[in-house]
Amino acid sequence: MSTIELTGNWEEQKSKLKQKFAALTDNDLLFVKGKKEEMLGKLQKKLGKTKEELFKIIGAL
């Protein structure tokens, strides 16, 4: 998943992630340009998922 895919409809994806995983907050899903890896790392820790699993989840939204 490229940065373009992540930022293109991120607001919509973020909303769906929050519905799917109630433990996520806006702060967890804060996407700052150049900080994608940092955000994904936070999500990995909070959800107990691998990076590949996260990409599949986000891609399926």
Image: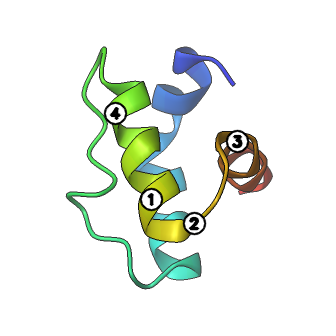
Please name the residue shown 26% across and 46% down the image. 30
Label 3 amino acid? Answer: Phe
- Which secondary structure lies at badge 4? helix
Task: Determine which residue is flagged by label 1.
Answer: 45
Q: Report if residue 14 is visible in the image.
A: no
Query: What is the distance, in whole Å, between disc 1 and disc 2 at their CAs?
Result: 5 Å
Task: Determine which residue is flagged by label 3.
Answer: 55
Q: How is the image coloured?
A: rainbow
Q: Are marks 1 and 2 in contact (CB under 8 Å)?
A: yes
Q: Which comes sooner in the sequence, label 4 or label 1?
A: 4
Q: Is residue 2 above or below residue 32?
A: above
Please name the residue shown 36% across and 40% down the image. 39
Q: Is residue 29 above or below residue 37?
A: below
- Is 22 or 12 nearer to us in this picture? 22
Q: Are marks 4 and 1 in contact (CB under 8 Å)?
A: no
Q: Which comes sooner in the sequence, label 2 or label 3?
A: 2
- Which secondary structure lies at badge 3? helix
Task: Determine which residue is flagged by label 2.
Answer: 48
Task: Determine which residue is flagged by label 4.
Answer: 38
Please name the residue shown 54% across and 31% down the image. 6
Q: Report if residue 24 is visible in the image.
A: yes
Query: In x, y percent, where is residue 31?
Result: 31, 36
Q: From the viewer's perspective, is the residue at label 3 or at label 4 nearer? A: 4
